[in-house]
Amino acid sequence: AETGVTLSGYGRFGLTYLDTRAVETQVTTRLRFNIDGKTETDSGVTFGGRIRIQHTNGATDATANAAMLYASFEGFRVEVGNVNTAFDSAGLIYNAEMGFVDSSYGDPQGAFFAYASGATPANYTGVFASYSMGDFTGRISYVNPDQTVSGSTEELSVSFDYASGPFAVSLAAYQDGAGLANNDGFFLGAAYTINDAATVGLNYIDEDSAGGRVVTLYGNYTMGATTLRAYVADLDVAGADTAYGLGADYDLGGARLSGSIQSGYAGETWADVGVRFDF
Amino acid sequence: AETGVTLSGYGRFGLTYLDTRAVETQVTTRLRFNIDGKTETDSGVTFGGRIRIQHTNGATDATANAAMLYASFEGFRVEVGNVNTAFDSAGLIYNAEMGFVDSSYGDPQGAFFAYASGATPANYTGVFASYSMGDFTGRISYVNPDQTVSGSTEELSVSFDYASGPFAVSLAAYQDGAGLANNDGFFLGAAYTINDAATVGLNYIDEDSAGGRVVTLYGNYTMGATTLRAYVADLDVAGADTAYGLGADYDLGGARLSGSIQSGYAGETWADVGVRFDF
Amino acid sequence: AETGVTLSGYGRFGLTYLDTRAVETQVTTRLRFNIDGKTETDSGVTFGGRIRIQHTNGATDATANAAMLYASFEGFRVEVGNVNTAFDSAGLIYNAEMGFVDSSYGDPQGAFFAYASGATPANYTGVFASYSMGDFTGRISYVNPDQTVSGSTEELSVSFDYASGPFAVSLAAYQDGAGLANNDGFFLGAAYTINDAATVGLNYIDEDSAGGRVVTLYGNYTMGATTLRAYVADLDVAGADTAYGLGADYDLGGARLSGSIQSGYAGETWADVGVRFDF
């Protein structure tokens, strides 16, 4: 029976620019440590848990977040507490992100629960289950924003990923996202790996709380240590501009130097350049 | 001179039921990490300290608690700061606990200080000393709820454990428990190990702040991977029901599946089922 | 590429005495854990970050502080976020400290930023750079107390250390220390190592927010496991007494027992005795 505690995480720092804020160029930092404890039983079931300690620029100190507990056996995994959610875990949903901050206007714009690195509401409780077999993964999650009162509006979400050769698809949906009644969301994504160097993908995201659906077309191209990234995203809201972004990663062999220039739905300009390293 | 930092702890999750709360059945979780740093001097004295990071369901994030510092040499140990207390450390005092939450109505019902996993009062300061030799352990602790003002009411507690063959006894007392004047408590416990499988014990606990003394009779019986647990507890307060509990542990080889059904002093019903694993 | 997370820190506990506080003798404790994550790239650049978890007596729980991120390459190092500052890092500036609490009235008495073990202001952001070559180290730091508003008063500081045989000198200055306009400070220190056992030094510290310059003469003398320490400090403020201190460290081989008696600028008496151990 294997047992123990491990530490891992990442750091990132650099400059970000946004032309709609008082000070346009700011220093942006994040440092994350995941503390993972686990025990494997004689029958091969692993029981474990995670607390994350993270600081992002702007906060006065770091947060040690609410715990996630889990059990896993072969391809099956169940989480309780501060869980990953099915929608947020969908395989292709954040693939249009770029820069050292890993951001994209082509991301979902609505409200739904996800694993919380910061504080959760008091009595927030989730249950998550996933199953992976070969190239298929299915997930379902349920979150009660306050399990100590009856009548809370609970979020339910599901997602499915599948890959076959160069094709990958991902499908996800939530009901009453973020515990808001009638706040539903749907996601369908597909990606095609053209060759060793190039991938293109299309994401369709329809969320009630976003004001309209988002369609994001993105692509990546790798040449040696450099990966170029681009996306175009359309938000179906009156007056919204087409958003787009251009980014590049340079592999430092253990870290990456990343930058991007992006234009948002209100015509605002975002840019970032910095490093990201995992440990 | 050995030196270093180690991480250890436990996780537990499952369902608890209590028929007197608004939502009777709730998900209950806890994840604990102890961070221990220590150095052993050339003469064999170990100096060390602990900070605990813990999250229990209901809290919005995890707490990194007040530090405990210690020195130890062979059977002798001294702690300062957020210390273990003598009464709370008495050997048999929590032996009637059961279920994955490790609870019992047969536990002490009064108010006294213990090592705090959450926040302490500001300027809370304790000193604890223990000595173990063979089957004997003695402990004494002193806690000042606020050492920066004169006139604080301080808690003093002592405890002694002794074992001889199948017999074990434990004796403990506190004066001005939890820093409350005239709040005294006394504990006497005895346990008898009948054979490899069965143990019975009797605890007598008399605490001013509990309203009356508690007498708890408990027993455990192990068959293979299964341990059955039972207790009956009497609280000498007018109108109090007799409390009792039935529980079972199933050893998963590195974790345990535990459950219990308990009836409290007001006739309420508590039940829990879940897993507990150490790492 | 080397990568990983390491834990280190120190603990200290003992008694402190100050004749001007309500309760003169108090228990004093501190426990510090540094969590350091880093990755070394193929080209030899190290990227890393630190979050510190620390508890000092008086606080209700421990603080996980704001992150410091860094990059280093050979003798060059850059930090961002909750950075070390140049002035606070000057080589000889705290050399008159003594006792297990490592304190001295001969320390700087003014206001300037330093690496924060506790909470920083929201949006506090620093940048620090240092370069070491042989016996020379130079540092520069810049701290913006709130990078999200324009017009913040920023602290700039520099320091230089140099050693040549038995001589060591250190020079440092800050402008607008602690983000306070016109709060400037200057430090010049020199130390001479007489032989294997004895060191003497002189520190000159002139800070606007201290009310007057401080001159500190100090010396240490080691005999076997014992190191004796002494200083005299003069604060050039009307009515200020001459401060002085006598201290001793005893090396326990992995820990030290330290004590001091010090007299402050208002004639107050401070004393401490306790242990300090690193891990």
Image (cartoon, coloured by chain):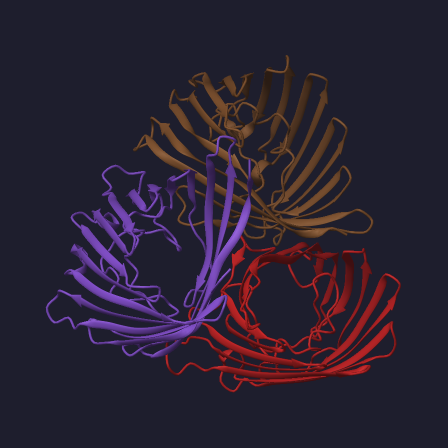
Chain colours: A red, B purple, C brown
Q: Is residue A187 left or right of residue B207?
A: right
Q: Is residue A245 left or right of residue B229?
A: right
The image shows residue B44 at horizontal and vertical percentages of 48, 34
- Residue drawn at 72 percent across, 56 percent down: A277
The answer to whether residue B158 shows anywhere in this view is yes
Q: How many marks?
A: 0
The image shows residue A30 at horizontal and vertical percentages of 64, 56
Viewer-nearest residue: B135 or C276: B135
The image shows residue B131 at horizontal and vertical percentages of 34, 40
Give the residue furthest to the top.
C194
Q: Is residue C7 above or below residue C269?
A: below
Viewer-nearest residue: B38 or B135: B135
Q: Is residue C44 left or right of residue B32?
A: right
- Residue drawn at 29 percent across, 51 percent down: B163
Q: Quadrant of the C terminus of chain C?
A: top right
Viewer-nearest residue: A66 or B138: B138
Locate residue B108: give its quadrant: bottom left
Viewer-nearest residue: B62 or C140: B62
- Residue drawn at 40 percent across, 33 percent down: C14
Give the residue furthest to the left.
B238
- Residue drawn at 13 percent across, 64 percent down: B236
The image shows residue A97 at horizontal and vertical percentages of 73, 70
The answer to whether residue A84 shows anywhere in this view is no
Q: Is residue B99 above or below residue C195?
A: below
